[in-house]
Amino acid sequence: MKNTSKSPSARGGFGSKIGFVLAAAGSAVGLGNIWRFPYLAAKYGGGIFLLIYIIFAITFGFTLMLTEIAIGRRTGKSVIGAYKAVDKRFSFLGILAAVIPALILPYYCVIGGWVLKYMTVFVTGGGEEASKATFASASDPEAKLSFFAHFIGLLEQPTIFFIIFVLLTSVAVFFGVEKGIEKVSKLLMPVLLILIIGIAVYTLTLDGAGDGLKYYLLPDFNGFTASKFFKTIAAACGQLFYSMSIAMGIMVTYGSYMRKEDSLESSVRQIEVFDTLVAILAGLIIVPAVFVFSGGNKSAINAGPGLMFDTLPKVFADMPAGQFIGAAFFILVTLAALTSSISLMETVVAVVIEKFKLSRTVSCVIVIGITLVLGMLSVLGYSVCSDFTIFKKQMLDFFDYITNNLMMPVLALLTCILIGYVVKTKYVEEEVMLGEKRFRSKLLYSVMIKFICPACMIMILLTATKI
Ligand code: PFF
């Protein structure tokens, strides 16, 4: 088994370790951390979820992320070429790893467009008015729609914000890895960290935030049955996947641009800490703030996916300096979503460049075109074509479901089998040793990749398919 990779510089690559870590953390830190993590933590018993999540991050998340980055760096190729280079019989995994980001990117940019709209509303001073406004529903004159429900049901505005978000994403990708993605990540990630820490400190000083904090951090064992425990584990595991950008080809792609002399193990640990820290901080902002302004009403915190788009803007509207905090918050979410969509687009663009031997510019144009077409299906699904569903799901939810619940666990499971049993763990160990004197988590890695990770993947698949 030869270590075949070309030096990353032959096809462009990150110029520094910090550039790589920030870009990968930028990919990991996204809507998953800020929109999804807090509502899941609130739903699954606060502290218990947090604890299980952290344990998963340092074991399961570490193993899968290290594996993907090592495959990328060792082969020096985009996902299609990379899996083929590991073992020809597993070439189909490369195709799966290219299709997943191509399906996620469009709907992720649609949601990115929603966030961009909120940012614009808050930055231009209309946050309070918008979050309290109600609109008549076209289908049921009695029903009142929130700003969010009304907005996503429109056609022009979500389309325009979606297109702007795709174009913003493509700027960094057009400029390439070092001059585009690395530069943007080095600029945006520190800004993101400062914003999130600043907002968290502010919301925690609000009167009554302590009770919300207790609700968020202290484990609540009340009514915690075995079945709830199992569900919490499955939810934490699924969230980790989503949050760390695992099993969507991204880490293989970014790994292929990583310098050989940089330490893989410590890079993965740093990305993991960054990602988990931002998720916990987002929860520190959202859960206590909603708790305070809903008067400790638990159903407000359990608003699920609507927590960030519906509940939180109302909280900002009532909060002292809320207009300003709301603007800062939605700038933060936009930046987080942008660095993630950049990584999704880069993964697909890298495949097009390599597979069809096209220039970066032409490849970008092709990927933008596909993204706009597929993304419009998601926009239309919430708008004029809302009666059209697949398996009772709107288009956006359908894309989200098949990628996150089915395709990604399958890709991760087969990657574990490929590394754990086919080419064996030495494939990754040798790559780790290039930048290191010793592989500190070697035993943990080996046990995880062979036994625990595959078991977790099977569990996610079973829960997703409700078998
Ligand atoms: N890890 C990123 C996030 O937490 O938002 C990016 C991402 C996750 C994109 C999951 C897409 C996805 F399905």
Image (cartoon, grey):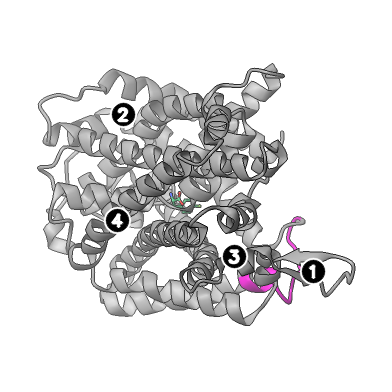
Q: Is residue 300 visible?
A: yes
* Amino acid under disc 2: Lys
Q: Which residue is mark 1?
A: 387
* Amino acid under disc 1: Asp
Q: Secondary structure at mark 4?
A: helix
Is disc 3 in contact with disc 1, using a CB cutoff of under 8 Å? no
Which one is nearer the viewer's eye here, 17 or 370?
17
Which one is nearer the viewer's eye here, 205 or 161?
205
Please identify, in this view, whether the residue under mark 1 or under mark 4 is nearer the observer. 4
First along the sequence among labels 2 and 3: 3
Please identify, in this view, whether the residue under mark 4 or under mark 3 is nearer the observer. 3
Q: In this image, 110 relative to 64: left or right?
A: right
Q: Residues within 10 Å of mark 4 (few under 14, many from 20)?
A: some
Q: Which residue is mark 2?
A: 424
Q: Residue sitting at 54 percent across and 67 percent down?
A: 110
Q: Residue sitting at 61 percent across and 82 percent down?
A: 156
Q: Position of residue 224 (x, y in %)?
A: 68, 19
First along the sequence among labels 3 and 1: 3
Please identify, in this view, whether the residue under mark 3 or under mark 1 is nearer the observer. 3
Is disc 2 in contact with disc 3, using a CB cutoff of under 8 Å? no
Q: Which residue is mark 3?
A: 128
Please identify, in this view, whether the residue under mark 2 or under mark 1 is nearer the observer. 1
